[in-house]
Image (cartoon, rainbow, N blue to C red):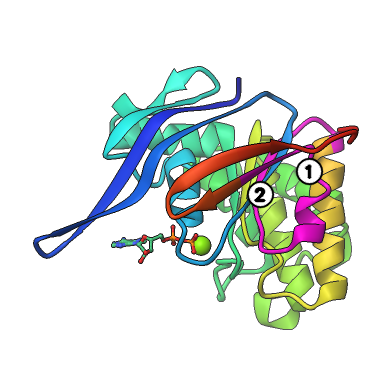
Amino acid sequence: MIVECRNIYKNYTTGKLEVPVLKDVNFSMEEGEYVAIMGPSGSGKSTLMNLIGCLDLPSSGRILIDGQDVSKCSSNELADVRLYKLGFVFQTFQLLAGQTALQNVELPLTYAHVPRARRRELAEEALGRVGLSDRMSFMPNQLSGGQKQRVAIARAIVNHPKLLLADEPTGALDSASGRQVMELFQKLNDEGVSVLMITHDREIAGRARRMAEIRDGILTLTEMEGREK
Ligand code: ADP
Ligand code: MG
């Protein structure tokens, strides 16, 4: 299993008020799978994604990433899981404005202390995989929304992660570039990368073999009948 969530609860405390957001979420995903998560705004989708992405810890319950129990990890260990096992793609790209596409993609490798020449080689390869070999020296503000998201995807895959997490990656894109970005996730999944994707779009979710739906912090799973991976 690439992801296992067992009896996950997440509460946020604001002032004296404890707000339950995730309620006994159980979810698992095998390596190589493509799973879509849907649900209305405020239902807890990003909260779950951030827990699986090791950006936050559950209030209770266990999360295993590639067999490793991350609910017990120190913040340094969590950073390593993020760096070596996960790639994260956000709705708003989260690129550094003052850095070229290539430098943005190199960033995780810098954290991983990869030597400069190798860093460049890997970043060029990742930009090639997303079809942006001709945009490597462009700054983010010289790129279209779809191109920015493809740079963000290149950054997410540059370390060859086992699991790609995407939180509404087409939410800020027009439908044509959204479609391109979705095709890219499909291609990466065909190449063996596990994909967990949050989306509002039923058509997009329909491409996944399994779908999870969150309502009010409760997750239910649906198998998509007759759909090949
Ligand atoms: P979704 O991604 O499905 O729109 P979220 O997971 O972002 O939903 O949020 C779920 C609920 O948790 C919302 O009611 C939101 O206000 C609350 N929430 C999210 N993050 C925090 C936080 N850091 N502190 C307090 N409440 C939060
Ligand atoms: Mg969200």
Q: Which residues are magenta?
A: 190-212
Disc 2/disc 1 C-alpha distance (Å): 9 Å
Q: Mark 2 vs mark 1: which is more N-terminal?
A: 2
Q: Nearer the viewer, residue 148 or 33?
A: 33
Asked which quadrant contains residue 225, the reply is top right
Label 2 C-beta lies within 8 Å of the nearest ligand 2 atom: no
Q: Of the residues shown, which amino acid type is indicated by label 2?
A: Met
- Say whether residue 170 is left or right of residue 192: left
Bin the neighbour count of mark 2 within 10 Å (Cα to Cα): few under 14, some 14-19, many 20 and up: many
Secondary structure under badge 1?
loop
Q: Of the residues shown, which amino acid type is indicated by label 1?
A: Ala
Q: Position of residue 113 (x, y in %)?
A: 50, 38
Q: Nearer the viewer, residue 89 or 197?
A: 197
Asked which quadrant contains residue 192, the reply is top right
132 w.r.t. 52: above or below: below
Q: Position of residue 36 (x, y in %)?
A: 68, 46
User: Which residue carries the number 2 mark?
Assistant: 197
Is the Cβ of the residue at disc 2 closer than 8 Å to that at disc 1? yes
User: Which residue carries the number 1 mark?
Assistant: 208
Q: Position of residue 26 (x, y in %)?
A: 48, 31
